Image (spheres, grey):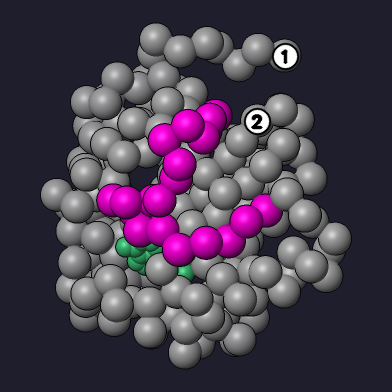
Amino acid sequence: MKKTVEEHAARFSEKAAEYDDSKSDEYHACAGLVVDYADPNPDDVVLDLGAGTGAIALALAPDAERVLARDVSEGMMDEGRRKADERGLSNVEFTYGEFRDPEVDPDQRVDIVTSNFALHHLADDEKREAIREMAATGARRIVLGDVAFFEEPDPDAPFYGPEVDDPATVGTLVEAFTGEGFAVTAVERVHDQVTVIVAERLDGDSDEE
Ligand SMILES: C[S@@+](CC[C@H](N)C(=O)[O-])C[C@H]1O[C@@H](n2cnc3c(N)ncnc32)[C@H](O)[C@@H]1O
């Protein structure tokens, strides 16, 4: 991680009020795919990590039983809480949680884990730890949208600030999911440096309708 968790939290809290208005077309495409692939049933509990102002959490809440939104930035989560109130969504909780310690009650059922544009702040070893934690929730599906490289990194390209970001290759992320007993069922190339990866638990129930 190129900045500490506290530094990332402070950086995002500072720009939380403008965050939603500053996003690229590729970010919106990526977020849309994460929401579509997550596809919760009405009785599913979703854990959204690095939830920020709630782009994914709030979009999924109307279709899920409950959404546990976790982030390290109180400023970003305050925006998310405000939007949840505005939209009358009472089944989303924004509380502190770090990728490698999402602070989910061990008795809490989690069916789907999502994360969008956040995991790339961690170093590759830390990402593997985070993916291990995602798997340990027992979720049947994990949907990760993120900055990740299909080819050699280009520091001048968009979505990559080498001073704060530490993206993995797509292959590294796919290997991390398969190593935790998941089948990777889709890899979307939103941009040369933006992907959505869908992982389904091999020994779990298939998506019962
Ligand atoms: C670019 S924003 C993405 C927010 C949201 N997922 C979205 O799609 O708009 C990245 C978020 O990751 C959070 N974050 C950074 N490092 C984190 C960590 N180690 N654990 C949890 N969240 C983290 C930041 O606070 C920020 O809210």
Residue lying at 79% horizontally and 67% vertically, measured from the top left:
85
Q: Position of residue 99 (x, y in %)?
A: 34, 53
Amino acid identity at mark 1: Glu
Residue 192 to residue 67: above or below? below
Q: Quadrant of residue 16?
A: bottom right
Which of the four quarters of the rendered structure image does ligand 1 lie in? Answer: bottom left
Residue 72 to residue 112: above or below? below
Residue 140 visible? The answer is yes
- Residue 151 image label: none
Q: Quadrant of the C terminus?
A: top right
Label 1 neighbourhood size at 10 Å, few (<14), some (14-19), many (20+)?
few
Q: Nearer the viewer, residue 81 or 19?
A: 81
The residue that label 1 is drawn on is: 209
Residue 29 to residue 109: above or below? below
Q: Is residue 40 left or right of residue 205?
A: right
Q: Nearer the viewer, residue 185 or 106?
A: 106
Q: CA distance from mark 1 to mark 2?
A: 11 Å
Main SS of the magenta part reads: loop
The residue that label 2 is drawn on is: 44
Q: Position of residue 124 (x, y in %)?
A: 17, 52
Magenta residues? Answer: 92-111
Amino acid identity at mark 2: Asp
Secondary element at tag 1: loop
